[in-house]
Image (cartoon, rainbow, N blue to C red):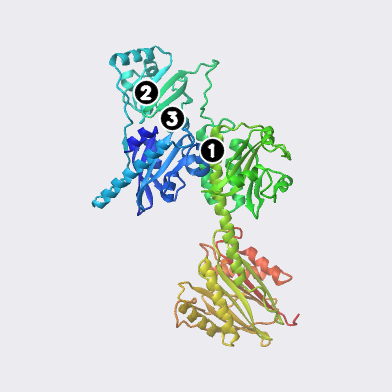
Amino acid sequence: MLAQAVRDTGAHIGAIYLLAEATQVLLMDTEIGLPAQIVKPWTRVRMNVSAPVAAAVRQRHLIWVPSHQELASRFPRTALSLPYPFATAAAPVQTGSRVWGSLVLLWPVSHPSELAPSELEVIDLACHKLGTLLQQAADSGHPLRSTGEPRVLAPAQTQEPDPQYALAAADYLNRLHEGCVALNLEGRITFASATAADVFGKNVAELLGKSLWEVAPWLQDPVFDDRCRAAVVSQQTTCCTARGPDGRKFEFCLYPDPSGISLRITPVVAGHPTQQHTHEPGLGSDGLPRADVFYNFLHMAAALTRALNVREVIDVVADHVMPVFKVQAMAIWISEGGKMRVIGSQGYDPDVLDLFDGLPLTSPTPAEHVLRTGEPAFFANWSELRQMYPYAVRYDQMAAWAYLPLAVSDDIVGACVLAFGQPHPFTAEERATLTALAGLMGQALDRVLLYDTKDRLAHSLQATLLPRSLPEIPGLKVAARYVPATRGVGIGGDFYDLIRLTDTSAAAVIGDVQGHNMTAAALMGQVRTAIHAHAVAGVSPGDVLRHTNRLLIDLDTDLFTSCLLIHFDLQLRTLCAANAGHPLPLMRPPKMPAEVIDVPAGLVLGIDPDADYPTVQAPFPPGAVVVLYTDGLVETPGTDLDNAIGDLADHLTRATYENLDQLSGTLLDYAPHTKHRADDIALLLLEHRANPG
C-alpha cells in the first residue's frame, strides 16, 4: 500500500507510522526512499511534538506543507532538523473515532503549491485501506504493532538495460576525465568508473558493494554528509568540495533520484574557474558551512529552553543568531490592546523604538503586517521596503530587514525584526532558516510571557494574603520585609503578622508553610487567620498553636507549617513565646550582644493532634530588638542551622543602624544566595521604645 501510494502520487519518500497509545508515541513501521542514517531520528515521534506527522494524528485531518519556508513557520523544530527544501503531506490513518497512525509522503519542492485532486484521492484511499486492515487485525485478536525498527522497502526498479548498452555506457563514462560513482540509498557503491577508482586509490572491483565512507574515510565530513542528506530529502542536485589524503581537492556533485545518488567527481585546479552551482553548502552570510551554523543553532535551542524572561530570550538570540548572520540590531513586538508594544531589543537606539512602540495595529508597517498575518517579510535593501511601504521613513542607518512571525501553532505571539547594516539578499535557504528560528523564539517567548503572567498573579496573591499594614502600638516599633524566592522556584508560604491585644500588649507571629505553590500560599492564609482569631481571644501562645495545629489536621492538607508566636507585654517589659518547629528568634538587648532566645521547639503544625507547645518567658527591656525570620534567611545546603543562627546573631550584634528599616536591609544582605534564592524570606523586627512616639 505504501509503495503504491508513493508511486501513484509521484512522491520520492513515504512512511507509515503506528500510534502506540500507551506511550502516546508514533512509531515508524515502514518506509521507502530514506537511508537508515536519516531515518533513525524520526523512527519515534511523540504526539506532543511540533511535526506534521504528529499534528495530523492530533488534529485528525490532512496536514499539507508545500515548502520549507512554510514548514519553518508552522513546524520550526522539524524544519531545523531537516533543513532541506521539500513538500510534505501527513494524513491520519483512522476508522471511525479510532486513530491508528499516519501516512507521510514527501515530494521535491518543485511540486505545485496545492495537492492535485488525484493525489488527494490516492492519499484518502491509502489511509482508508490501511485503517481497514489495522481494524481487521485488531478485531481478529492479532493487532499489528510497530517494533520501532521500520521495514525499509526497496524503491521501484527501473527496467534492466541491455548488456551491450551497459558496456557502452561504462566505456563512455571511463573515457571522461571526471569520476563517476553510483550509490544506492544506503551509500553502497553499485558502479564506479576507472577515474573514480583512481581518486579513491582502489581498483573498480575493490569498490563495488562497499560503503563510500568505507573506501574513502576522508569523506566522513559534516559538510559532505549534509550534502548527501540534502540530495536524498530534497531530490535536488547539491555540490561541495573535499580534499583527499594526498592533498588533491575535488568537487563532488550529487545527482539524486528515488533509487540513489550519482556522484560526479571533478578535480579542482588552482586558478582554474569552476562552474558555480546554485546549491552551495554555505548558509551564513559570511559563508559559514551549514554544519557550523546548525551547531550554533543547536546551542540556541538548548539555551532557549532555559530562558525565564524576555531579556534572556533576547540575549540567546543575540549570542547565537546575530553573529552568524551579521545582524546589527533586533527588536521584538507583541500585540497588546490593539497596539504594537516593544518588549525587548538589542542594538537599536531607544529613540527609534519609541517611535514604533504603541503604534495602532492599523498602522501600515512591516511589523504590523507580520503580527496581523503571520507571514514573514524580507527586504534586501531600503528600496524594496519603500516599494511595499511608500510612506515609510528611514530613522536609522540599517540597510536590510527580516520581519519574522513568532508563532506557536497557529497563534502569533509576536514579531521579530532583524536589521542588517548592509544590503542583504536573502536566499531561499536563509529565509526558511530564519523563519524556523523565529518559530523556536516564538515558543520560548510564549512560555516566558505565560510564566511572567503566572508569576505576577502568584505574587499578587501572596501579597494579598500578607498584612497590607501592621497596627501601630505605642512603645513598639516594627519593621517587616518579605523577599520572594528567585524566579522559577514558585510562590512560597512564608508569612508574618502583628496582632494588637491591648493598648500595651501585642502578639507577633512568623511562619512557613511547606512547599512553593498555590496550595501552600492558600494554606498560609488559613493559618494566619486561625492564629489571629485565637490570639485575640486571649489564650496563651502555646494554646494558640495547639488550636491551630488541630485545625490543620482537620483540613487534611498533607502540608506542614512551622510557626513561632510571641506575646509582648510592654508594661511588664516581658515576652512569652511558643514554637512549632521554627528557627529560634534573636534578641539584641540594649548595649549588649545579640543572643538566641531558647524557645522549646514543639512539632511543626499538622502532624500530631496531641502535640504540646510549651511556653517560655523572657525579659523585653526598653531598647531591646527582637528578630523573627524564616529559614530562607539562614539556611543553605551543607551548613549547620544552629551555626548559621549563631552567625546571624553575631551579625546582628555588629550591625549599626538608625532605624529598623535600615537594620532589616542589613540582615537581608547577610542572607545566603542573595541573587539566586531557593527559598522565600520573611523578616519581622520589633523594638521596645520606652517613650511611645
Please, what is the three-letter code of the amino acid marked with disc 1? Thr
Look at the image and tell me in which quarter the C terminus lies: bottom right
Residue depicted at 46% across the width and 36% down the height: 87
> Where is mark 1, residue-wise?
433
Query: Which one is closest to the eye, mark 3 or mark 2?
Result: 3
The answer to whether 200 is drawn above or below residue 27 in the figure is above
Please, what is the three-letter code of the amino acid marked with disc 3? Gln
Q: Earlier in the sequence, mark 1 or mark 3?
A: 3
- Residue 119 position, x and y percent, is 40, 36
Residue 145 seen: no
Image quadrant of residue 221?
top left
Query: Which one is closest to the eye, mark 1 or mark 3?
Result: 3
User: Badge 3: few (under 14), some or many (20 or more) residues near its Cα, within 10 Å?
Assistant: many
Left/right of residue 18 with respect to residue 561 in the rendered view: left
The answer to whether 424 is drawn above or below residue 202 in the figure is below
Q: Secondary structure at mark 3?
A: loop
Residue 182 is marked as: 2
Q: Secondary structure at mark 1?
A: helix
| 1 and 3 marks in contact (CB < 8 Å) | no
Image quadrant of residue 483?
bottom right
- Residue 207 position, x and y percent, is 33, 22
Residue 235 is marked as: 3
**Is 38 or 292 nearer to us in this picture?**
38
Per the model, the C-alpha gap separating discs 3 and 2 is 15 Å
